[in-house]
C-alpha cells in the first residue's frame, strides 16, 4: 500500500492559551510519497516530529492540516480502527492481563459483521503469525514473563495478525539491549520482506535506520531534510544537518572559505574546488576522507590514537574544527607514519562536503556536480523515492527550539531550592551551585 | 559536595559529634515516640486485650439475679470482689437477643445491595469523567461533595426529602420524592413515616448509603484510571476494539486491583453502617416513628445499644462483628486474588 | 416541576437513544479486510464513497458518545447535588410553604429569619421552639475540640513519623508493622473499653473531662503517621547529613526542612482531622451526653418542634445548612489537599 502525505502539519497549541508564541509546530508541511512494500525509516533527533508523523499516519493524532492517503484513499479523517494499520508502540503496550495468545487474538476478535472469523480461523492465524515472529512456544505466557525482545515480537505479531495495509513501528528497538537490538532489527527486516507490508518505523538511531531501511527520511524540527536510499543520503548529504546526523564516528566539521576555486581551512589551502563560488563555508569531512601524507595540506595536532583492529582512529585537534576533536580513520598499517605532535592530511574529494555558512545547504564542486546530477537523474528515471531540503529552516523556529527547557518542578526542585538557600545561609561559598545546574540544563 | 565531606575517612570534630549523637539516637527515637506509644497503649492496645477479656467473662448479673457487674465496675474492683470466670455467656446472650437477627440481616442486606450498586455506578462515572475534557474538574468536584458532608446532617435532609407531608392518607399531601414519582405516573410511597414498610425504609437507606459511598470510590477509581498507561487504549483503538470491548477487556481488568480495593473497603464499611441510619431515623428508634424493636438496627448499633449497660455483651457483639468482617475480608481477598490480574 | 420532569425525561430518552445508536453502529461497523498471509497483501481499499460514509459515521458517533457522556454525568451530578439544593431552598421556606401539598422548587419568599431563629430560639409565630439547639455553644465546642485535637495530634504525628523515618533504633520495623496491624481492627472494638477507661478516669462527668475524653483517645492516628513517614522518607538523606555536618539539631532540622517539605501532607492531615471533629457523632454522643455536645450530636438530638409538637422542617434545614456549609467551603477552597489525603488512603491496603 502506497502511503502519501500531503502538506501534513501538526501544531500543538500552547498550554497557556494567550501565549500564541508557545505553540509548537511539531510537523511542518510534510510532503512524502512512500512506495508500496518498502521499509521506511523516519530518522531524526528527539523532538523532530517523527513520532508525531507516525501517530498521524496511524490516526491516533489528527493533523492540523494536510492529508494522508493510503493508495488512492484519503484516510485523513478516518479513525485508527478504520485505517487498517498495525502499530507497534515503543514500550509495546501489550495488555498485561492477557496471555500472548489472547494479545494476538485481540484484534481478530474485534472484527465484526462479514469480516468476523470463525474461532478456528482466528486461532490458525494467530498461530501462523506467532510462528512468523518465532514466539509460538510462549503462547500461554503473560507478557511480564517474557524478555524485552520476545515482548517486542508479540507486539509485532499483534500488529500483523489482522494483515494491516501499513505497519507502523515507533522506536521499536529503543527498549532492547545492544545485542538484542542487532538481532531484532534483522528480524524486523525479515518479517517485512516475508509479508511485503509497507512498513514505516521511527528511530533516532541513524545506524539502525541505515542498516535496515529501504529508504530513510531525515527530519529536523518537523521538516524533511532529506530522503532516499541510506547510502545515497550518506554519500550525498543535501545539507549540513544531514551530514552531521549520519555516520559514526560523526563527520568532522571545519569552518573554511572558498576563494578562487580553492578551499581554505584556517590559512591552509586544502583542496581545489572547481566551480564553487567564493563564500564562507562549513567543510564536512568524513573520518574516512583523510589520507595521511607528509606533504598533506591540512595540519592537525595529534592528541591520541584509538586502535580499532584493522583501522585506527587518529584523534587530533584543529583550531578551525567545530567538533572538539577531529577524528580520522585510516588503515592500521599507517600507524608508524604518525610521528611528532602534528599530522598532515590530504583529503579525498568525494568525502568532503561544502555547505554555505548562511543556508547550511550543500555547495557542489568539481566532480561532485556531475555525480549528483547523474544520480538525481537516475533516481528520477527509476521512480525512486528521494527529496531534499534546500535552504535554511526559518530562524524563529530554530530559536524557539533552542530555548532552554523550563525549570523542573516538584519535589526535586523544591529540595534543591531549599538546599541552595540553606547552604547560602550557612556557607556562602556554595552559592555557585545553582548556576552550575542551569548551565548543565542548557547544555543538554 | 557536602556528602563527600561527610564521607571522608578522617573524622573531623564535627563528624565525631555526629557519631556520638548517633549513639544517643535510639534513646531520642523512643523519646519522640513516647506520646504516640502512651496513647496507643491506653486507647488501642489495652482495649484489644480488655475487650476480648470482657467478652469472655461470665455475666455476674445472672448469678446474683441483678446487675452488679459492668466493665466499669470491673475496673474499679480489680481487688477481686467478684468471681469472674471464663464463659461464652455473653455471646449466647447477644445471639439469643431478639434484635440480633434483625441487626445481622439488616447489615448483610445493606452491604450486599449497596456495594455492587455503588461500585458499578462509581466505575461508570469514573470512566465517563476520564473520557471528557471540558467541565471535568467541576464535575469531579461535584461528585466529591458528599464525602465532605456530615453524614447525620445530610441524613436528615434525605429524611425530609422522602417525608410525606401532611396527614398520611390525604391524597394530595406528598413530599418531594413522592412528587417526582407521581410526575412519572407512579404512586406515592410512604417512605419513612409511621407505618412505612421495611422495604420502603431500606430503599431510602440504600439510596443514601450509595450516595454517600460514591465519592471515595470515584476518587480511587479515577486515580486508578489516570494511572493506566494511555497506550493500552491507543493500542486497543488501533486494534479496532469497540468502546464496550475496551471497557470490559481493557479498563476493567487493568483497574481490577482498584476495583478489588474499593469492594473490600466497601464491604468493611457496609458492615460498620450505623450513622446513616441514625441520620435518617434517629438513634433512639432506629426505625420509622412508631416502630418498636429498632427494626433498622445494625451490628454496630447492637454494640452501642449495650455499651453503657453491659460491656460484656457489647464486647461480645463487637467481637462477633469483627469476626464477620474478618471472614468476609478474607473471602474477598481470596476471590480477588483469583480474579485480579497481576 | 414540569420543567424538571421534562428535563429528566429528555435526559433519560437521550441515554436510551445513545445506547441504541451505539448498539446499531457497533453491530455494523466495518473493518477493511485484507487477504491473509502467503498471498499478496491486498491493496484494495475502500471506495471514496465508503470512506466518506465511514468518516461521517465516525464523527457522528464521536459527538454522540460525548453527548451521551455529558448527559450521563450531568444527570448523576444532579442526583448528587439534589439534596444540597433541597436543603438550601427548604431552609428558606416558610413552614406553610414547606408543608404545601405541591412542593415549590424555589421559595416564594426568602425567609432568612429561619436562620435567625437558630440563634434566638423563637419561631415565626412567637412560639418557642425547643430550646435544645444552642448553635453558638455547639460551634464553639466543636471548633475548640477540632483545633486542640488537630494541633496536638500534628505534633505527636510529626514526632512519631520522624522517628520512624529518620532515626535508628532497635525494633523499629517490628514496631511500625505492629502499628500498621492495628489499622485493620474495626474501631468498635476499641470504643467499648475506651468508654470504660475514660469513665474510670472520671472524664464523662464534667465539661473539662469530656473535652479531654474527646481529644486524647484520638491523638494518634496510625494512618497519618504512615502517611507522613512516607513523605519524610522521600526527602533525600543527603539533606539530613548536610544539616548534621552544619551542626543543626534534629529538632531544628525537622522544623526547618522536613516540615516545610511535607507541608501538603500536613495540610491534608489538618483538614481531615478538622473534618473528623466536625463530623464525629458516635463517640461524642456516647460520652458527651447533654453536658458537652459537639455540633453533629446537637443537631441530631434537637427536636426543632414548636409548642404544638410540629416539626419545623425549614428551621431544621437551616440548622443542617449551617452545619454542612463550613465543610463545603473548606472543601471548595482546599479541594486539592482533601482529595490528595483521601486518595492516599487508597494505598493503605
Image (spheres, coloured by chain):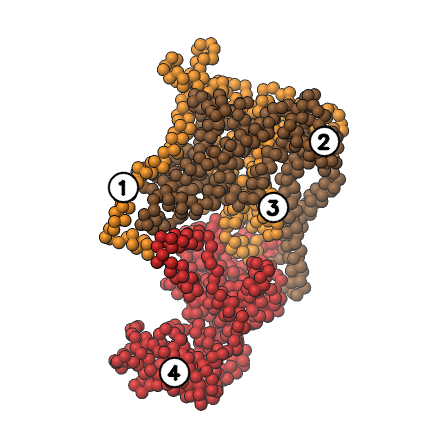
Chain colours: A red, B orange, C brown
Helix, strand or loop under label 4: loop
Q: Which mark is residue A266?
A: 4
Helix, strand or loop under label 3: helix
Chain ID at mark 1: B
Q: For marks 3 and 4, give the CA distance.
A: 68 Å
Q: For marks 1 and 4, give the CA distance.
A: 67 Å
Q: For marks 2 and 3, give the CA distance.
A: 32 Å
Residue highlighted by disc 1: B23
Q: For marks 1 and 2, give the CA distance.
A: 72 Å
Which sits in the foreground, C56 or B317? B317
Of circles 1 and 4, which is in front? Answer: 1
Q: For marks 1 and 3, give the CA distance.
A: 55 Å
Residue highlighted by disc 2: C94
Dot 1 or dot 3, earlier in sequence: 1
Q: Residue furthest top?
A: B65
Location of residue C81 in the rendering, given as x and y in whole percent from the top left corner: 64, 40
Chain ID at mark 3: B
Where is residue A353, by image quadrant?
bottom left
Residue C48 horizontal side relative to residue A407, left or right: right
Disc 2 crowd, CA 10 A, few/some/many (<14, 14-19, 20+): many
Location of residue C300 in the rendering, given as x and y in whole percent from the top left corner: 59, 27
C240 lies above or below A261: above
> Which image quarter holds the N terminus of chain A?
bottom right
Which sits in the foreground, C205 or B310? C205
Q: Which mark is residue B139?
A: 3
1 and 4 marks on the same chain: no
The number of callouts visible is: 4
Is residue B118 visible in this depiction of the protein? no
> Which image quarter holds the C terminus of chain A?
bottom left
Amino acid at each position: 500500500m502506497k502511503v502519501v502525505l500531503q502538506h501534513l502539519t501538526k501544531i500543538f497549541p500552547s498550554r497557556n492559551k494567550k501565549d500564541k508564541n508557545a505553540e509548537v509546530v511539531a510537523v511542518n508541511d510534510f510532503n512524502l510519497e512512500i512506495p508500496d512494500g518498502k521499509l521506511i525509516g523516519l530518522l531524526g533527533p528527539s523532538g523532530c516530529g517523527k513520532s508525531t508523523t507516525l501517530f498521524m499516519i496511524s490516526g491516533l493524532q489528527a493533523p492540523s492540516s494536510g492529508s494522508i492517503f493510503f493508495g488512492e484513499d484519503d484516510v485523513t479523517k478516518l479513525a485508527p480502527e478504520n485505517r487498517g494499520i498495525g502499530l507497534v508502540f515503543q514500550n509495546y503496550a501489550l495488555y498485561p492481563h492477557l496471555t500472548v495468545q489472547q494479545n494476538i487474538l485481540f484484534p481478530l476478535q474485534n472484527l465484526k459483521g462479514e469480516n468476523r472469523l470463525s474461532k478456528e480461523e482466528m486461532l490458525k492465524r494467530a498461530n501462523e503469525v506467532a510462528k512468523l515472529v518465532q514466539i509460538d512456544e510462549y503462547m500461554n505466557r503473560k507478557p511480564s514473563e517474557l524478555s524485552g525482545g520476545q515482548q517486542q515480537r508479540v507486539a509485532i505479531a499483534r500488529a500483523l495478525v489482522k494483515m494491516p495495509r501499513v505497519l507502523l513501528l515507533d522506536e521499536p528497538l529503543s527498549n532492547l539491549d545492544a545485542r538484542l537490538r542487532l538481532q531484532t532489527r534483522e528480524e524486523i527486516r525479515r518479517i517485512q520482506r516475508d509479508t511485503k507490508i509497507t512498513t514505516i518505523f521511527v528511530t533516532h538511531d541513524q545506524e539502525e535506520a541505515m542498516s535496515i531501511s529501504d529508504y530513510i527520511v531525515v527530519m529536523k524540527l518537523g521538516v524533511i531534510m532529506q530522503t532516499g536510499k541510506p547510502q545515497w543520503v550518506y554519500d550525498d548529504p543535501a545539507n549540513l544537518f544531514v551530514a552531521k546526523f549520519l555516520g559514526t564516528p560523526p563527520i568532522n566539521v571545519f569552518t573554511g572559505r572558498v576563494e578562487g576555486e580553492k578551499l581554505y581551512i584556517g590559512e591552509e589551502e586544502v583542496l581545489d574546488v572547481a566551480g564553487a563560488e567564493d563564500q564562507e563555508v562549513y567543510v564536512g569531512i568524513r573520518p574516512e576522507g583523510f589520507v595521511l601524507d607528509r606533504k598533506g595540506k591540512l595540519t592537525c595536532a595529534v592528541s591520541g590514537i584509538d586502535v580499532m583492529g584493522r583501522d585506527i582512529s587518529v584523534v587530533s585537534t584543529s583550531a578551525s574544527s567545530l567538533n572538539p576533536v577531529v577524528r580520522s580513520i585510516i588503515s592500521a598499517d599507517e600507524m608508524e607514519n604518525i610521528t611528532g605532535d602534528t599530522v598532515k592530511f590530504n583529503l579525498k574529494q568525494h568525502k568532503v562536503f561544502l555547505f554555505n555558512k548562511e543556508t547550511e545547504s550543500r555547495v557542489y564542486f568539481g566532480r561532485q556536480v556531475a555525480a549528483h546530477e547523474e544520480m538525481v537523474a537516475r533516481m528520477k528515471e527509476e521512480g525512486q523515492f528521494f527529496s531534499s531540503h534546500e535552504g535554511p529552516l526559518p530562524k524563529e523556529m530554530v530559536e524557539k527550539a533552542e530555548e532552554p527547557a523550563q525549570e523542573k518542578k516538584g519535589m526535586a526542585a523544591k529540595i534543591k531550592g531549599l538546599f541552595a538557600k540553606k547552604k547560602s545561609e550557612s556557607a556562602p561559598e556554595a552559592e555557585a551551585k545553582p548556576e552550575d545546574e542551569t548551565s548543565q540544563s542548557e547544555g543538554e | 559536595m557536602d556528602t563527600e565531606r561527610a564521607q571522608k575517612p578522617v573524622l573531623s570534630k564535627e563528624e565525631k559529634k555526629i557519631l556520638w549523637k548517633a549513639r544517643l539516637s535510639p534513646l531520642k527515637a523512643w523519646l519522640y515516640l513516647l506520646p504516640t506509644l502512651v496513647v496507643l497503649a491506653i486507647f488501642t492496645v489495652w482495649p484489644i486485650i480488655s475487650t476480648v477479656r470482657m467478652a469472655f467473662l461470665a455475666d455476674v448479673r445472672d448469678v446474683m439475679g441483678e446487675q452488679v457487674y459492668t466493665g466499669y465496675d470491673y475496673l474499679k474492683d480489680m481487688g477481686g470482689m467478684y468471681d469472674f470466670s471464663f464463659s461464652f455467656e455473653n455471646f449466647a446472650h447477644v445471639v439469643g437477643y431478639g434484635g440480633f437477627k434483625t441487626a445481622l440481616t439488616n447489615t448483610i442486606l445493606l452491604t450486599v445491595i449497596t456495594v455492587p450498586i455503588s461500585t458499578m455506578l462509581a466505575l461508570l462515572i469514573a470512566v465517563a469523567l476520564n473520557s471528557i475534557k471540558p467541565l471535568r474538574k467541576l464535575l469531579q468536584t461535584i461528585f466529591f461533595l458528599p464525602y465532605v458532608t456530615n453524614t447525620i446532617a445530610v441524613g436528615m435532609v434525605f429524611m425530609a426529602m422522602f417525608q410525606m407531608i401532611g396527614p398520611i392518607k390525604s391524597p394530595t399531601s406528598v413530599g418531594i420524592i413522592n412528587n417526582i414519582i407521581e410526575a412519572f405516573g407512579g404512586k406515592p410511597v410512604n417512605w419513612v413515616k409511621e407505618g412505612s414498610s421495611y422495604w420502603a425504609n431500606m430503599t431510602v437507606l440504600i439510596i443514601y448509603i450509595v450516595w454517600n459511598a460514591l465519592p471515595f470510590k470515584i476518587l480511587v477509581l479515577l486515580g486508578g484510571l489516570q494511572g493506566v498507561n494511555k497506550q493500552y487504549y491507543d493500542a486497543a483503538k488501533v486494534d479496532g476494539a469497540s468502546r464496550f470491548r475496551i471497557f470490559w477487556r481493557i479498563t476493567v481488568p487493568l483497574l481490577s486491583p482498584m476495583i478489588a480495593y474499593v469492594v473490600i473497603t466497601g464491604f468493611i464499611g457496609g458492615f460498620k453502617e450505623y450513622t446513616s441510619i441514625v441520620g435518617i431515623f434517629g438513634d433512639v428508634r432506629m426505625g420509622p416513628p412508631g416502630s418498636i424493636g429498632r427494626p433498622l438496627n445494625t451490628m454496630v448499633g447492637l454494640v452501642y445499644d449495650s455499651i453503657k449497660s453491659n460491656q460484656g455483651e457489647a464486647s461480645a457483639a463487637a467481637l462477633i462483628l469483627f469476626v464477620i468482617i474478618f471472614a468476609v475480608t478474607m473471602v474477598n481477598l481470596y476471590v480477588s486474588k483469583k480474579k485480579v490480574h497481576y | 416541576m414540569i420543567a424538571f420532569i421534562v428535563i429528566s425525561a429528555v435526559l433519560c430518552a437521550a441515554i436510551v437513544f445513545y445506547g441504541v445508536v451505539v448498539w446499531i453502529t457497533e453491530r455494523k461497523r466495518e473493518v477493511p479486510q485484507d487477504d491473509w498471509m502467503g498471498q499478496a497483501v491486498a491493496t484494495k481499499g475502500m471506495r471514496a464513497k465508503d470512506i466518506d460514509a465511514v468518516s461521517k459515521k465516525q464523527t457522528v458517533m464521536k459527538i454522540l458518545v460525548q453527548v451521551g457522556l455529558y448527559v450521563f454525568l450531568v444527570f448523576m451530578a444532579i442526583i448528587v447535588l439534589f439534596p444540597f439544593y433541597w436543603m438550601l431552598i427548604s431552609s428558606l421556606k416558610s413552614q406553610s410553604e414547606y408543608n404545601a401539598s405541591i412542593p415549590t422548587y424555589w421559595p416564594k419568599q426568602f425567609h432568612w429569619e429561619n436562620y435567625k431563629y437558630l440563634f434566638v430560639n423563637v419561631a415565626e409565630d412567637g412560639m418557642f421552639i425547643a430550646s435544645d439547639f444552642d448553635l453558638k455553644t455547639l460551634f464553639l465546642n466543636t471548633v475548640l475540640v477540632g483545633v486542640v485535637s488537630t494541633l496536638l495530634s500534628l505534633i505527636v504525628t510529626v514526632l512519631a513519623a520522624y522517628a520512624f523515618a529518620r532515626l535508628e533504633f532497635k525494633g523499629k520495623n517490628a514496631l511500625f508493622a505492629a502499628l500498621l496491624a492495628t489499622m485493620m481492627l474495626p474501631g468498635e472494638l476499641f470504643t467499648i473499653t475506651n468508654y470504660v477507661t475514660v469513665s474510670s478516669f472520671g472524664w464523662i462527668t464534667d465539661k473539662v473531662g469530656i473535652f479531654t475524653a474527646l481529644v486524647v483517645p484520638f491523638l494518634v492516628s496510625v494512618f497519618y503517621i504512615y502517611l507522613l513517614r512516607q513523605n519524610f522518607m522521600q526527602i533525600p538523606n543527603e539533606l539530613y547529613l548536610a544539616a548534621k555536618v552544619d551542626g543543626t539539631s534534629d529538632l531544628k532540622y525537622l522544623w526547618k526542612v522536613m516540615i516545610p517539605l511535607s507541608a501538603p501532607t500536613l495540610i491534608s492531615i489538618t483538614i481531615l482531622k478538622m473534618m473528623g471533629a466536625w463530623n464525629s457523632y458516635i463517640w461524642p454522643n456516647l460520652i458527651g451526653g447533654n453536658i458537652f455536645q459537639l455540633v453533629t450530636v446537637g443537631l441530631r438530638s434537637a427536636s426543632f418542634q414548636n409548642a404544638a409538637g410540629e416539626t419545623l422542617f425549614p428551621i431544621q434545614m437551616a440548622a443542617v445548612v449551617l452545619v454542612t456549609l463550613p465543610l463545603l467551603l473548606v472543601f471548595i477552597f482546599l479541594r486539592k489537599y482533601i482529595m490528595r489525603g483521601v486518595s492516599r488512603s487508597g494505598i493503605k491496603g
